[in-house]
Image (spheres, rainbow, N blue to C red):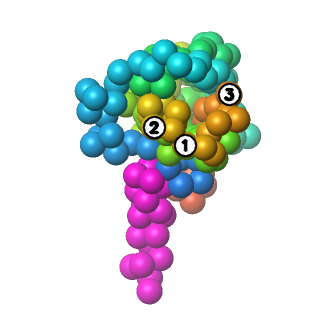
Amino acid sequence: MIGISYAAVPLYRLFCANTGFNGTPVIDRDRFGPERLVPQDTRRIRITFESNTSDTLPWSFKPELREIYVVPGETALTFYKAKSKAKTDIIGIATYNVTPYRAGSYFNKIQCFCFEEQKLSPGEDVDMPVFFFIDPDFLDDPLMKDVNTITLSYTFFNSQYANGLKPVQSQQ
């Protein structure tokens, strides 16, 4: 039971990433074939970007663009910018979701910084890319007929807190 409990979180993340469950963008490499990356000139979708940081992470974190418009099948690249306000090196980790949740299975990330630890030195800032596309099957789903805006939202956490540890206090 302890082993199953320990494995539950990574297995749940894998399940969500492969199915789009609960607004999680799909990261299944099999869905990135060249036949999926053909822009469909039928309907533009507004993609908005949001950002949050945990109270335990002294960073500023913002999308460089607030919104873009894409057609299903078109690849898009955008960036988020993070800047450390800490006095020491600090590691953060981001989670994400897509709203409306039912659109998560059509939001395919080719590259992103989520679930990867990001270490920033005091005052350091970085641009973090998100490369994605909306699956063309979006157009054939009757549940997507009224979806004109999709929001990609990231939240950055202090990695030490995200792993259930308390931050180490430096002794000076």
In the image, taking residue 115 as reference, residue 110 lies left or right, namely left
Q: Secondary structure at mark 1?
A: loop
- Please name whichever residue, 128 or 30, is drawn nearer the observer in this view of the structure: 30
Q: Secondary structure at mark 2?
A: helix
Magenta region:
1-19
Dot 1: few (<14), some (14–19), or many (≥20) neighbours within 10 Å?
A: few
- Please name whichever residue, 27 or 85, is drawn nearer the observer in this view of the structure: 27
Q: Earlier in the sequence, mark 3 or mark 1?
A: 1
- Report the residue marked by disc 2: 137
Image quarter for residue 157? top right
Task: Locate residue 26, reporting x and y percent.
Answer: 44, 43
In the picture, the disc for residue 141 is 1
Q: State yes or no: discs 2 and 1 in contact (Cβ < 8 Å).
A: yes
In the image, taking residue 39 as reference, residue 102 lies left or right, namely right
Q: Nearer the viewer, mark 3 or mark 1?
A: 1
- Report the residue marked by disc 3: 148
Task: Locate residue 9, reporting x and y percent.
Answer: 48, 64
**114 w.r.t. 64: above or below:** below
In the picture, the disc for residue 27 is none
**76 w.r.t. 114: above or below:** above
Cα–Cα span, label 3 and label 2: 15 Å
Three-letter residue code for mark 3: Asn
